[in-house]
Image: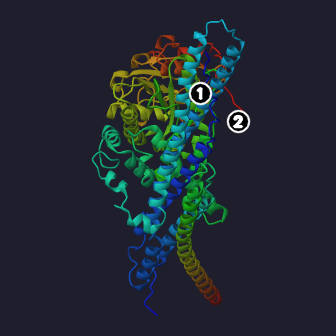
Amino acid sequence: MGDYTVDYATLFESAKFWREENARLTTASARLTDASTTGFGSGVSGDVASFVSTWSTTVSSTASAVDEIAQNVDDAHAAYLSADFEAQLAFEAWLEDAS
Amino acid sequence: MSITIPADVPIVPWLSGSPEQVVAFADDLLSVSVTLDDLDTTANANSTYDGWEGAAAASYGTYVGAAAENAQTSSLALRAVAAAADTYATELQRLLDERERLVDARTTFNADCDSLRASVDAAAPEDDLSELRAVASELATRRTTIVDDIATMETDTTANEDDLRSVLTANASVAAVLAAPGGGIDPADAAMGLPGAPGSGGSAQDTAAWWAALTPAQRYAVLAAHPEVIGSADGLPAEVRDEANRALLTADLEALELLDEQGRLPSDLRKTLENAQAAHEALGNVVVDPVSDPPVEVPPLLHLYDPNAFDGEGAVAIAYGNPDTADNVSTIVPGTTVKGTSIAGDVRNAENLYTSARVSDPNATTSTILWIGYDSPEFTDLSVASESMAIAGGERLADYVDGLNAARAEGDPAHMSVVGHSYGSTTVGRAATDHGLAVDDIIAIGSPGLGDEAQNAGDLGGPEVWVGNASRDPVARLGDNGWVGLGADGLGQDPAEQGFGATRFEAEDVNRADESESADWGFTGNMDGTSFDDHSRYFNDGTESLHNMGRIVAGDDGDVGVAEGTYDPWYSGPVDPEFDRDPQAQPSIVVEPDR
């Protein structure tokens, strides 16, 4: 196991950033996949459809990679938040025990 | 002797395709390209963080680098095909028009042949046939031309498809893009490094010259790679800014609404989303030109869009009519409490002013702009009585107006005006006194003053100064009248006062406040007979104010209803002769579409 020291504030900013990027990539990928090629003439519409199919796969792959980052960073952020909250509750409970 | 009648022209080959749908396809690709380009840039900027070091940071950077690896290449490929699709659509439209022309020509030709056949059949042996032979000869020539044109159409169709296909092939995969000469290099980078590029510190004229010198490919590249820069760049063509800003708006709406649906929208992006939604709603406002026959809709241009400006308050501008080409161009500068979300409702002011100017001079083209381009104070904020925001906003406004002038063709200046409402008039005043506002007319309405530097109209640098302060508007009473006013705490002299030197125009409304009302809001001075509603009537349909502003914007100065200015006798407080004049209802001019 390496030295995976994570700064909490940085993690928070990172989670926010990737959440937004993930949303932008998800919608962009869907837009490309759904792009209509029906406006092209019959002589070239097949080529256009093939182009869209190829790049949809590539962009979808990029979107998936970003989604993975966003999920992991977001999950980590939530876990830290939860851990902190549980620690706070425990601390408050401990304080209450004294009174 | 026989007559040779040409054979009928065969049917014109069918041509499939829809340019509108191809343009929509290109827009989709460009939008995706913009997002990917953004990812490449921002992911690299976010692959490391200050204060985050060690193995964790390195691992994170590895993931980020891998995710963004193909983003730039994808962006370039999609951009290239989007541009090619646009070109294809333009040519397809030409070819469809040509086919339609040829179909008509064929129909007429074949009918003329039928007619000639009938004439020949009806001719008697002893008749002189020379006239019919001439007709046959002319038809033969026509047939050759039509058949040649059909062949050219088919050749051009094939060439159009071949051109598009070659771009598709060159961008068929990541490997294909990288293998091409200069592959993977964004031409936008070099273009943005040229002198005069937006953000390089040049003037609006420099930016206009920079744009004019770019190749079509460079223009497309910078539009796709830097829409946030292009959309806000003063001096660039309005239609280019509109395209860039709409791409940003679409991307914002789709992504942020998705986050909102997922319940994951960060609080600081809430305002961004609301600003985007307001801009989208405003763009849906349908404006019908009041004098065109048949009626035509006036498409809006998104001339400025920065939903994160001013700590999330937002900046946005929408134009009705193209300010680059219109004969008359007017920019409305709103006042307090205006922010990005205000555009949805306030854009109607630009609509009404557009309508009034067009009615005033139907032979002149018009563009009116609702400009929310500065950080304005809250109405309840003490900063209302401070000029600091007007000073900052005035600089932005002067730059914006410089951009409007610079974007026009050389030797084709517009009749340019600005309309400052309320605190917006103070902003206009500071733009004029501090920077020189390059306009022909300044119009101040509901004005509490044009700033401390404007002691009289002459201090505004030369534009003709018009003031439409309604007598029942309490804000219009805040300007200094000698001893009466807010003094150092105010926003300058009362511009409606006779001694100020502006031309006051009639700006009353038949629905104005009753004399018994009083807008008591804590400021000193006589507020009898005022209502805050009268601070918000200036653009209303049927008011003297809208009627007269339209005439000023259209340059019909002689038809403006001039009002007597306020004065401040030694024996009493300020006197407004307009207070006792009966307002005149003006004709309703705004065309209401089915909203």
Q: Secondary structure at mark 1?
A: helix
Q: Quadrant of the C terminus of chain B?
A: top right
Q: Which mark is residue B595?
A: 2
Residue drawn at the location 44% of the way across and 32% of the way down: B324
Q: Considering depth in this image, is B107 or B288 the residue closer to the camera?
A: B107
Q: Is residue B210 left or right of residue B376?
A: left
Frontmost residue, A58 versus B303? A58
**Residue type (three-letter) at the residue carrying disc 2:** Arg
The quarter holding residue B108 reads top right
Please state which amino acid type lies under the numbered disc 1: Asn
Eyeballing the image, is B213 above or below B308? above
* Subunit ID for the residue under disc 1: B
- Residue B580 percent across, percent down from the top left: 59, 14
For the point 53% across and 58% down, the residue is B32
Label 1 Cα crowd, 10 Å radius (few <14 / some 14-19 / many 20+): many
Residue receiving disc 1: B352
Vertical relation: B356 (above or below) B209: above
